[in-house]
Amino acid sequence: MPNQSARIDLQPDVDTLVLRCAGTWHWQQTLPAQPGLAGCKQVRLLAEEALEDNEGALLAWLLHLARNCQAQQIALDADGLPAGLGRLLALALAVPARPGKPEDNTSHFIQRLGETALRLWADLPQAAHFIGEVSQGLGRLLRGRANFRWRDFLWLLEDCGPRALPIASLISFLVGTILAYMGAVQLAQFGAQIYIADLVAIGMVREVGALMTGVILAGRTGAAFAAQIGTMQVNEEIDALRTLGLSPIDVLVLPRLLALLLMVPLLTLYAGVVGIGAGMLVATTVFGVGAREYFNETMLALSWTHILIGMLKGTVYGALVAFAGCLRGMQCGRSAQAVGEATTSAVVTSILLITVSASILTIMFQRMGI
Amino acid sequence: MDTPALSVRGLTMAYDGRVIQQDLDFDIPRGQIFVIMGGSGCGKSTLLRHLIGLQQPAAGRILYGGDEDYWAADETRQDALKRGSGVLFQGGALWSSLTLAENIALPLEEFTDLPAAAIREIVAVKLALVGLSGFENHYPAEISGGMKKRAGLARAMALNPDILFCDEPSAGLDPLSARRLDELLLELRASLGSTIVLVTHELASIFAVADQAIFLDAESRTMTASGNPHHLAQHGSALVRHFLARGEDA
Ligand SMILES: Nc1ncnc2c1ncn2[C@@H]1O[C@H](COP(=O)(O)OP(=O)(O)O)[C@@H](O)[C@H]1O
Ligand SMILES: [Mg+2]
């Protein structure tokens, strides 16, 4: 049998347009254009014997035609269609199309850039509002009136602290090694290898330990906060809290914020110690510095100021990570995709905030001369 | 006549300016089972969110106890009003980091001074009522959708609320569990005098439990019928009769 391509034969009558559907309808071929309906009062559909529409292409075409007819109030007589096709068309037309949302036009790059900038701007009041809510929550907590769940808090403490140790150890060790190597190569030129100890101790304890801890927490803990709270948003778990009159700030945000604030100075300190250990390993094995000498030099170099400044920076970074994670989680939309976006956004926001605050703090302490 | 448990006056609901339903006016009488019907997407869940204070009306008022405007009340009072109602969300909304027992215990721990042993007993009773004895230590991820619904109902009943809101409680349940659930709702109304607001499509359960029903129409975006479902099935508009037609003979 010849495989005839899809065809619509027009037979204009006085005020009736008769359409004869014919051939085999495929999505791969160009479908016939919709007929002009101007001036006609009725459209009658007929079908040829050999009509085939296994893929639904004709049905889609007819649906367009029918909607056009409805729009122009033209009667459509589909009795001439094969029974199955006629019934499907009737079913598809049974519920009239509702005006829905307009399509999201995939916009131009420049437009998206502008929208992103506007969103960042629009974020500010929301972020300020969030900070306000968290402060109120802290106030309630101090007065013992917050719905603070200690069991969650203890679990979060463990998750933010001890469970972050392996990755914190690895990164601090590697960074300590790099720092020692880079310093040593320069210092060895004039036989001052022993000052590797100063470089590593001050560098790790005062700056890098806190920075690395902040970045690790951003990727590990901040992202987890956003994902946890975001998923709860999607599953209406946060609504379920609200209907009990429980504040999601008290139940979800405060424990996370406090757990991170408690753990981050310890992690920073730990990162410093591991870094110093790595530096010592490099100095003693590669550059021939004695272990005891190295230790003594480290003790000389370190002062409480360095240690406290490092811990303070770590705490600031930790607070920013917790803030960004919880904020993005609370702002999360109601779909799985939104959770992914919230998580990414939490990490990006954290790292951005850490970088900015690191610069500000460093300059500030420099100016203060400490 | 008693004052109604909840009244809705001239309520219009919208998302970002897109109106979902408008000019809703009805009373939910105390101690009755009140059903919200309508095709999917017509705004039943959205109406429920308005009734429980999760979403602010675009226009109109939600009145508790006949005359107390929810959105005019201060925050403490709003929390108290919320606590007087139990909610079963469409997806169960169990807290996923807690076991079923902990889910049900949480409201009791937060809002009563009951000793732990008593709370355990209450949890066991609530779980037994919804047919989930033995699942105390399961996490929500470890049970089926229908079981989550039932556990959500157990949680909603934890504080013996005056009003219980349930969003499609029997969707996803097998016929036997669905019937048991209907019986449970009837029992709650009879023994505790609870007011129950039910969103459901299950015609059999509408006819079995509903004292009153309203029908939301997606087309005209407003309420097109209200009354007893048996009455509506005879005398409602064509659309409502059509909607209810398949349940009468069931
Ligand atoms: N968060 C939302 N944002 C925008 N539109 C929504 C949202 N939730 C629901 N809608 C819209 O509101 C209408 C009613 O939804 P819903 O109340 O869930 O319907 P039902 O529960 O009756 O099936 C639907 O058209 C839906 O698209
Ligand atoms: Mg719904």
Image (cartoon, rainbow, N blue to C red):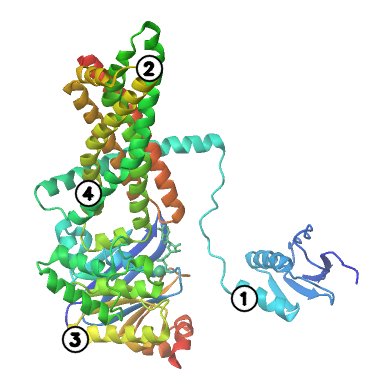
Q: Which residue is mark 3?
A: B191
Q: Vertically, is A306 above or below A266? A: above
Q: Are marks 1 and 4 in contact (CB under 8 Å)?
A: no
x 22%, y 63%: residue:
A244
**Ligand 1 lies in quarter:** bottom left
Image coords of residue B29 (percent x, y):
23, 79
Q: Residues within 10 Å of mark 1 (few under 14, many from 20)?
A: few
Q: Amino acid at mark 3?
A: Ser
Does label 2 lie on the same chain as label 4? yes
Dot 1 and dot 3 residues touching (CB under 8 Å): no
Q: Quadrant of residue B26?
A: bottom left
Disc marking residue A287: 2
Q: Give the secondary structure at mark 3.
A: helix
The chain identifier of the residue carrying mark 4 reads A
Mark 3 surroundings within 10 Å by alpha-carbon count, few (fewer than 14), some (14 through 19), many (20 or more): few
Q: Which residue is drawn at the image coordinates 40% and 11% (left, top)?
A: A186
Q: Amino acid at mark 2?
A: Phe
The secondary element bearing badge 4 is classed as: helix
